Every structure is written in C-alpha cells, then in structure tokens.
Image (cartoon, rainbow, N blue to C red):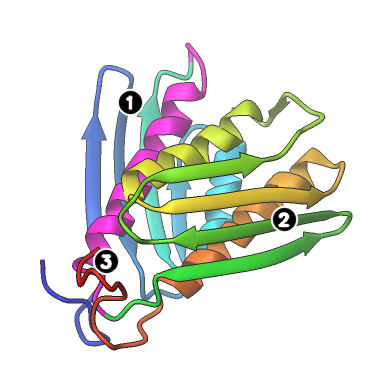
Amino acid sequence: MPEASTSAPRQATVTRKTSETDISATLSLDGTGTSSIQTGVGFLDHMLTSFSRHSRIDLAVICKGDLEVDDHHSVEDVAIVIGSAILQALGSCAGIRRFGSALVPMDESLARAAVDLGGRSFAVVKAEFGRPVIQGMSTEMVGHFFTSIASGLKANIHIAVLDGHNTHHMIEAMFKAFALAMKDAVRIEGGGIPSTKGVL
C-alpha cells in the first residue's frame, strides 16, 4: 500500500456480506465530519454520526441486517467493517501519530478513551448501564462494538465510563471520547513509521 501523506487521499470502501448482514462503508480520514449512516439500529446511527462529526472522519455506512433476529449481528459487523475501512485507509501508517486519548464530559457523565494503532487487536471497555436497550440497540452491545472495531482496525482500544448515571449520556460520551482519540491517532505528523520495529 502507498505511504500515507498529506497529498495522498486516505480513503477506503469496504463491503461485507454474510447470511446475517450486508454492509458497505466508505470513509475518508481527512474529512470534515460529514456522514450518512443507515444501519437499521437507530441509536447506533446516532452514535456513528457523532463519531464522524467529532473525529472529522467522513463516513457513509449502509447495513441491511437480520434485525428480526436481534441487533447483535448488525452492530458487530458494522464495527468490523468500519475498523477494516480505517485500517485500509491508513495504508502503511507512515507519518501518523499512532496514539490518541481523550476525556469527554457529557452532563453528569465522564468517559475516557485511549487508542493505539499499533497493529494489535485488544479492547478493554469498562461501563455499567442502567437501561438494557436504547432505540433498538442493546446496551450490552456497546462493549462488543468497541471489541469488534478493535478487531477490524487491529488496534488497542481502552474505554471507560468514569462517572455517570444517564445511560444515553454515558454511551455518547464514550463514542465522543473514542472519536477524539481517533482524530488524534490518525493525524499525520511525519517522520516515517511510528514504531521502533519499523513497521506496524
């Protein structure tokens, strides 16, 4: 893949079709935060729109999933596809900052996110929610979303809710913190591959 630079567009389109979901995601890492999200899961659409806006990653997602069964397959596979698309858009990762972190308050809630785009998949998500479902999305799928995007992106993702009681606010703070951490991590700083190994 070509090395990332300020002149080469860092864009990707990834599709994934299984017996459970049919998904297409197109994104640009150097965007303005515009989005078009149609997953069939209302709250996930809201969270991905927020992620796009605050990460400044342009994002278009269409998912047709087996929602008559559950939201699980759609949420999981959308995360895998977005993660894979970001990884593809990063190319060799030359010049990126690699690491990013953020603290985001949302009224009574406070969330922390830290990201390492180092080529290893691992996620730690710490949050407890009072509501089991928000607008079609099971809150147990929030942690699984971040685990799945870490898998597709080959990244370390650590996210924790440090305070809060309103489930909507807690989850939205998590997605916004993740967005800001990603905005920082994908930023071009120059200087080649950000690893002593010489490759990510």
**On-image quarter of the C terminus:** bottom left
- Vertical placement of 92 versus 59: above or below? below
The one nearer the camera, 56 or 140, is 140
Most extreme residue toward the top, as rendered?
Answer: 69
Q: What are the residue bounds of the magenta stretch?
A: 68-94
Which is more foreground, mark 1 or mark 2?
2
Mark 3 against mark 1, which lies toward the viewer?
3
Q: Position of residue 13 (x, y in %)?
A: 23, 54
The residue at the point 59 percent across, 36 percent down is 142
Task: Left or right? Give the position of 88 relative to 167.
Answer: left
Residue 111 picture quarter: bottom right
In this picture, is 48 found above or below 93?
A: above
Crowding around mark 1 (Cα neighbors within 10 Å: few <14, some 14 to 19, many 20+) is some
Of pointers 3 and 1, the one earlier in the residue sequence: 1
Residue appearing at x 69%, y 45% in the figure:
171
Is disc 3 surrounded by few (<14), some (14 to 19) or many (20+) residues within 10 Å? many
Q: Determine whether 102 is above or below 76 in the image.
A: below
Measuring 47% from the left and 39% from the top, which residue is drawn there? 147
Q: Which residue is mark 3?
A: 90
Q: Position of residue 199 (x, y in %)?
A: 20, 67
Identify the secondary structure beneath mark 2. strand
The disc label shown at residue 21, or none = 1
| Kind of residue sitting beneath label 1 | Thr
Q: Which residue is mark 2?
A: 111
Residue 53 in view of the camera? no
Secondary structure of residue under mark 1 = strand
